[in-house]
Image: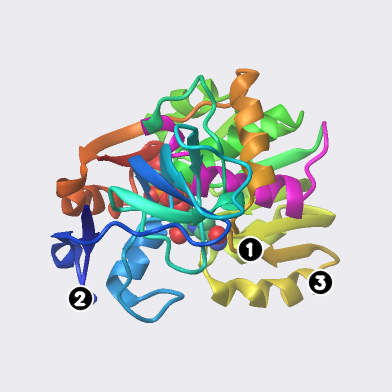
Amino acid sequence: MRAIEQDRFGGPEVLNLVEVDRPEPGPAEVLVRVHAAGVNPTDFWHRATGGLLGQPVRLGWDLSGVVEAVGVGAALFRPGDEVFGMPRLPQAAGTYAEYVTAPSRHLARKPAGLSHVEAAGLGLAGLTAWQALVDVAGVQPGQRVLVHAAAGGVGHLAVQIAKARGAHVIGTASAAKHAFVHGLGADEVIDYTTTDFAKRLHDLDVVMDSIGGEYGPRSLRTLRPGGILVALASPAETYLEEQAAQQGKRARFMIVEPDAAGLTSLAGLVGTGQLRVEVDTVLPLDQVAKAHEIGQTGRTKGKIILTL
Ligand SMILES: NC(=O)c1ccc[n+]([C@@H]2O[C@H](COP(=O)([O-])OP(=O)(O)OC[C@H]3O[C@@H](n4cnc5c(N)ncnc54)[C@H](OP(=O)(O)O)[C@@H]3O)[C@@H](O)[C@H]2O)c1
């Protein structure tokens, strides 16, 4: 099968198209024929530095495809089932490949209303938004929720999820993307290039921050007492937990985890028309370097997807 591999860290040019053996599903695993694989900033980080894993790995955590074979004991799926998801993270999943094995409970059935290209953009980014807003922050109807980078892969799904939970949603984005973010259901959109959100907003219940750096402490300032900041950008942000506590607020740094129940909830929102996936760019697998070059500009609207 064809797959993308790298034998050293570096820029997009280290990514090579190679021919490798097709994997076999182990116990409780399925073998998926990948139709589309999502591209995420964590892919750029792992390509360049090894990220959480410290060594070059086959990249890619997002997939949508069709079950080709089931390992012993993987009782949930049969060959031919359409699935999507985000297997194995924080271990390598290697979805930049024609076939991939995954623990069966790291996947869920692909919503009928999404193409493989769209579903490949929902796993990692959708689970991040779901776990941050629903599991960690526990967003309630009527709460005021700030979503930073509201036009991005995670942000555009977070806006829709928070709306579906009945929240009042405020997003940050540059002016050219305001119509898009309003169209997702955001009640207010702040142009972060001209307006200091930390001066404009106060008494928020929840902030989801994927930007990091000084956005963390500035976001804390916008929370009400007892409000919560979910930080996503860097493990270094655990320092915010103590800083928040000193202000009578809460902060949590979170890493997204495989989560079939979360995937099923996301699929449910797709089914009720409350969640859609914006696709910025679609490229074939052999143009993975171009996909990374576009993605690491940090300016995309929605998701970048590789097709196989
Ligand atoms: N902890 C975890 O488990 C986890 C999981 C997923 C992602 N993340 C992290 O979250 C971050 C975002 O991921 P993503 O997939 O959403 O990235 P992405 O799709 O590349 O985000 C691109 C978007 O970010 C917006 N943006 C850039 N700088 C901004 C700023 N200062 N204020 C507001 N918006 C800004 C851009 O809008 P403009 O063009 O308008 O600037 C663009 O639409 C990454 O750092 C990623 O590593 C962490």
Q: Does 264 appear above or below 70?
A: above
- The magenta-colored residue range is 117-141
Residue type at mark 2 is: Asp
Residue type at mark 1 is: Met
Query: Residue 10: which numbered mark, if any?
Result: none
Quarter-wise, where is residue 50 in the image? bottom left
Q: State which tag comes first along the sequence, 2 or 3.
A: 2
Q: Secondary structure at mark 2?
A: loop
Measured Cα–Cα span from mark 2 to mark 3: 43 Å
Residue type at mark 3 is: Ala
Q: State which tag comes first along the sequence, 1 or 3.
A: 3
Which residue has dot 3 on it? 245
Q: Nearer the viewer, residue 122 or 17?
A: 17
Quarter-wise, where is residue 21 in the image? bottom left
Query: Residue 7: which numbered mark, if any?
Result: 2
Q: Does 19 appear above or below 182?
A: below
Q: Nearer the viewer, mark 1 or mark 3?
A: 1
Q: Nearer the viewer, residue 200 or 287?
A: 287
Label 2 Cα crowd, 10 Å radius (few <14 / some 14-19 / many 20+): few
Q: Nearer the viewer, residue 305 or 183?
A: 305
Residue 134 highlighted magenta (yes or no) = yes
Label 1 Cα crowd, 10 Å radius (few <14 / some 14-19 / many 20+): some
Q: Secondary structure at mark 1?
A: loop
